[in-house]
Amino acid sequence: MQAPLVKLALVLIGFAGSAIAAPGGSVEIRFIEPGRYVDANNRFSSGIGPQATLTELRRLMEQSASPYLAPGERLVIDVLDVDLAGFPNPGANFPYGLRVVTDATPPSFRLRYSLLNQRGQRIASNDERVSDINFLLGARTTQAGSFPYERELLREWARRRFANRSQRAHEGGTEEGIGSVKGLGRAGPA
């Protein structure tokens, strides 16, 4: 009986050690005037309340961006607007409401970000609207958890913005140009 427990403990220690051994950069999320967001007047229509919605969106943004940051880098994201996928149908699923999602109601974020190196120097920045009008085409039928469309949109945005930055810099480009990349065909200046 003790042998399986010892093996489990060693596996867990290994996972913990790998997380500690590879520290990445930090991500700071700031919600700017959330009471003015598109979905603010209807409690973000998620059924979990506005504070819980913002907390979950913060977690999704941090998880989306942190894998692409080098140790010591700092990414500051100001969230200027949030428009969740779908629209509220308050009469359905009382008391939480229900969001009706169609291809005409994609998720959208207005973000302003700055990526800083270890010395605090800005290496990338931009102000952009992040959305994907084709978000249902890539939707998985078994998406679980809260905000699945927003999660996929933020993951793709972070990957396009911050992955392979060092490779681009070594190929003769600079990291300064990252902020101006339109990417996705779905993100651009707000």
Image (cartoon, rainbow, N blue to C red):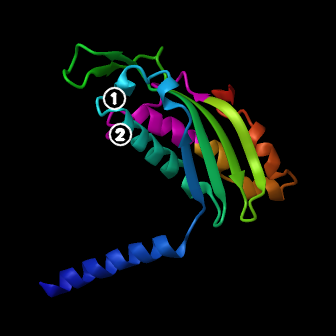
The residue carrying pointer 2 sits among few (fewer than 14), some (14 to 19) or many (20 or more) residues within 10 Å by Cα, namely few
Q: Give residue 174's position: percent from left, percent from top.
A: 84, 51
Q: Name the element at disc 1.
A: loop
Tell me the kind of residue under disc 1: Ser
Farthest residue to the right: give it: 172
Q: Is residue 177 above or below residue 149?
A: below
Type of amino acid under label 2? Ala
Q: In this picture, which residue range is highlighted in magenta? A: 130-157
Question: 67 above or below 138?
Answer: below
- Check whether the beta carbons of the residues at disc 2 and disc 1 lie within 8 A of each other: yes
- Mark on residue 52? 2
Q: Nearer the viewer, residue 90 or 142?
A: 90
Count the numbered circles shown: 2
Instruction: List x then y, in percent, for residue 8.
Output: 26, 77
Side of 114 relative to 170 (left or right) = left
Q: Which mark is residue 46?
A: 1
Residue shown at 67%/31% (left/top)?
A: 128
Which quadrant of the structure image shows residue 11? bottom left
Mark 2 falls on what kind of element?
A: helix
